[in-house]
Image (spheres, helix red, strand yellow):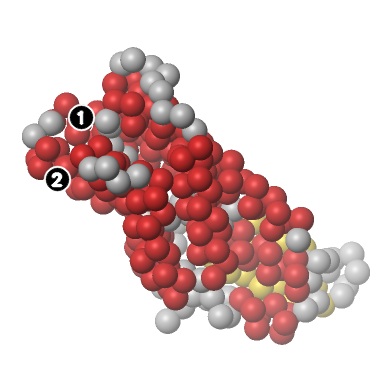
Amino acid sequence: MPKIIWHSLVIILGAAAIACGFNWFLVPHQLLSGGVSGISMLLGYFTTLNLSIMYFVLNIPLLIAGWFILGRRFITLSILSVAATSWFIALLPVFAVATDPLLSSVFGGVLIGMGTGVSFRVGGSTGGLDIVGSIFTRKRDFPIGTVMAGMNGTIIMLAGYLSDNWNTALASMVSIYITGKVLDLIHISHVKVTLYIITNETEAMLKKLLVRPRGVTKIKTQGAYTDIEKDMLMTVTTRYELVEIKRIIKDTDPNAFVNIVETVGVMGSFRRS
């Protein structure tokens, strides 16, 4: 329970950072973010629709799709992030911290990237194309920030073409690029790690680990000091999945000894078929 509370608090703080990036840097200069938030901003700029309401409503279909593909915990935290971000957008006043649109795009991108990154670090997302990016990176080993920047960039370029305002579009592209880079610095999901798990609860551990898409190798070991034989489980996973695997290990065998090392590269089948 304390961990759930802590993760929820981090999600809420990330949502506050995103809302600050919107209301204090992007919206005053009519700059755009990417994905669902960018669409919400366009609707808010050129119609009487409310930005916070549209942000929440447009996320609903993606959250429903993610529920069946990415898991309940991930989407539950994502729902919390979307709801908190919508609330902060409605709560915080809109004013320009910086008068220069380019500076605003830079610092707005930093805040949004930080808010999105910490959400991913605790196993959630900020909704929108974050969910699409998460689905994509589960099938391909690319940095999620780069994937999202590519998808969001396409949307921004289309918006620039439709509005015939390339200054705003290009400044928005700067913000999206920085958001992606900050996100990758905070949450590096494409980096692989190898776990060596020495446990007395081998079967219980395997039962939980083998439902995941990564293979597990069981190795017989013997303690040099005690001469006691134990099983060592070896698995290669990503930094994104590491939080969930560590939780499984602690729940199954709190006394397990785990060595986690960064993996330079992987040859052969990375995903268990």
Q: Please name whichever residue, 2 or 92, is drawn nearer the observer in this view of the structure.
A: 92
| Marks 2 and 1, how far apart at CA | 12 Å
How far from the left and from the top, in percent, is residue 208? 64, 79
Residue drawn at the location 51% of the way across and 37% of the way down: 91
Q: What residue type is labelled 2?
A: Leu
Residue drawn at the location 55% of the way across and 56% of the way down: 80
Q: Is residue 167 above or below residue 79?
A: above
How far from the left and from the top, in percent, is residue 142? 36, 55
Q: Please name whichever residue, 158 or 239, is drawn nearer the observer in this view of the structure.
A: 158
The answer to whether any part of residue 62 appears in the image is yes
Q: Is residue 2 above or below residue 212?
A: above
Which mark, residue 168? 1
Q: Please name whichever residue, 130 or 204, is drawn nearer the observer in this view of the structure.
A: 130
- Quadrant in which residue 118 is drawn: top right
Residue drawn at the location 87% of the way across and 75% of the way down: 228
Which mark, residue 130? none
Left or right: 141 in relation to 231: left
Quadrant where the N terminus sits is bottom right
Q: How many labels does the image show?
A: 2
How far from the left and from the top, in percent, is residue 65? 39, 71
The mark that comes first in sequence, 2 or 1, is: 2
Which mark, residue 158? 2
Quadrant where the C terminus sits is bottom left
